[in-house]
Amino acid sequence: MIVNLDKFIAEERPRWERLDAALRRLADDPWRELPVAEARELEGLYQRACADLARLRTYAADPGLRTYLEGLVARGYAEIHGQKTAGGRVRPGLWLAKGFPQAFRRRVGAFWFAFALMVAGGVFGAGAVAFDPEAKEVIMPFSHLLGDPAERVAKEEKAAAEGEDRGADRRATFAGSLMVHNTQVTLNAMALGLTWGVGTLVLMFYNGVILGAVALDYVAAGQSVFLAGWLLPHGSVEIPAILLGGQAGFVLAGALIGRRDRLPLAARLRAAGPDVVSLCGGAALLLVWAGLIESFLSQHHEPAVPYAAKIAFGVAQLAALVWWLARSGVAAAPGGGAERAKGGGA
C-alpha cells in the first residue's frame, strides 16, 4: 500500500522518465547494440516500473498516470522480450538504411582484406596477359572475351550506329548469365568461409585475375574508353557486391578460427551470424541491380549511348554506394562523435 502517493510519484517519476528515454533511443535506432551495463539498467528500470504499476493499481491513483505507466511497461516488455512483430526490426527500409551498412562497417576489416586480395589478383592477371597473350584462353571465363578487343568494339559500335537490335536477345541472355554467375561467386565466397577462409581467399584472388586480364587486354588494344563505358555502369555495383560476399566469408572464417577470442565456437558463430546474413542480403540486392543495369545500359554502346554518359553514371553510382556504406545509419554518440566501425573479421 502506498502511504503517500505524491511522495511516491515524485521519487519514482525520474526512473520512469529514464526508462522512457531509453526506450525512445532504441525505437530511433533498433539495430544499436546495447552495452552490458545499459542493458542491465534497462531491465532494472523495467522491473521497477512493473512493480510501481502493480502498486498503483491497488490505489485510487490518477487514471492518466496509470495509463502512462501501463504504456511504458508494455513498451519495455516488447523491447526486452523481443515482441517486435509490429514495430519491425525486420523492416526492409530500416535494414537498408541502418542494418546493412552498419553490419558492413562493423566488419570493414574483412572487406579490405577481400579488396586487397582482388587487387593482388588483378595485378597477377594483367601481368600474365602482358607476358603471355595466350594465357587469355586459360584465364577468361567467357568465350566472347577471347577475341581481339578492337574487332569486338568495331562490331558493337557498327551495330549501334545502324540501329540493329538483332543482338538484344543475346545481350539479355548474357546479362542473365552474368547475374547467375556473380550470384554464385558471391554466395560461394561466403560459404567457403567454412574452409577457414581458404576457399574465399582463392575466389577473391581469381576474380581479381579475371578483372586484371580483361582490363589490360582492352587497354593494350587502345579501347580504354570502351572498357570504362562497358564496365563502370554495372561493375561499380557488381564488383563491390562480390567483395561483400568475400567479406561475409572472412567474417565466418574469423568466427571459426576465433583468434584471441575465448568464447565457445557456437557462441562465436551466433555472434557473427546476423552480420553474415546482412552482408549476403545486401550483396544479393546489389547483384540484382547490377544485372538490370547490365541489360539496359552497359551493353549499349556509342553512338546509341555516349560513353561519357555511361562513365558518368557509373562514377555517380559508385559514389552513392560508397556514401551509403560509409555514412548511412551512422548514429551520433553521446559525446558528439559518431559510431566507430569494428575492423576485425570476426
Image (cartoon, rainbow, N blue to C red):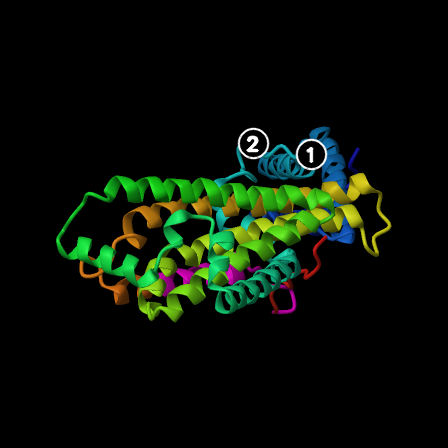
Q: How packed is label 2: few (under 14 Cα within 10 Å), some, or many (20 or more)?
A: few
Measuring from the top left, give residue 35's x and y in whole percent: 74, 53
Asked whether 67 falls inside the magenta stretch, the response is: no
Name the residue nearer the viewer: 213 or 327. Answer: 213
Which SS class for mark 2? Answer: loop
Q: Which residues are magenta?
A: 314-336
Q: Residue at x 31, y 54 (%)?
A: 298
In the rendered image, which residue does mark 1 sit on?
81
Asked whether 326 falls inside the magenta stretch, the response is: yes
Name the residue nearer the viewer: 79 or 142. Answer: 142
Amino acid type assigned to the residue bearing label 1 in the image: His
Q: Is residue 279 left or right of residue 293?
A: right
Query: Is residue 162 positioned above or below 61 on the image?
Result: below
Name the residue nearer the viewer: 136 or 90. Answer: 136
What numbered label is drawn on residue 85? 2
Please, which residue is most extreme toward the right here? 262
Measuring from the top left, give residue 152's x and y in whole percent: 29, 57
Residue 225, visible in the rendered structure = yes
Please, which residue is most extreme toward the top here? 58
Query: Is residue 84 positioned above or below 305 on the image?
Result: above
Amino acid type assigned to the residue bearing label 2 in the image: Thr
Tell me whether the residue at label 1 lies in contact with that at label 2, contact meaning CB atoms closer than 8 angstroms: no
Q: CA distance from mark 1 to mark 2?
A: 12 Å
Predominant SS along the magenta part: helix
Q: How packed is label 1: few (under 14 Cα within 10 Å), some, or many (20 or more)?
A: few
Measuring from the top left, give residue 265's x and y in whole percent: 81, 42
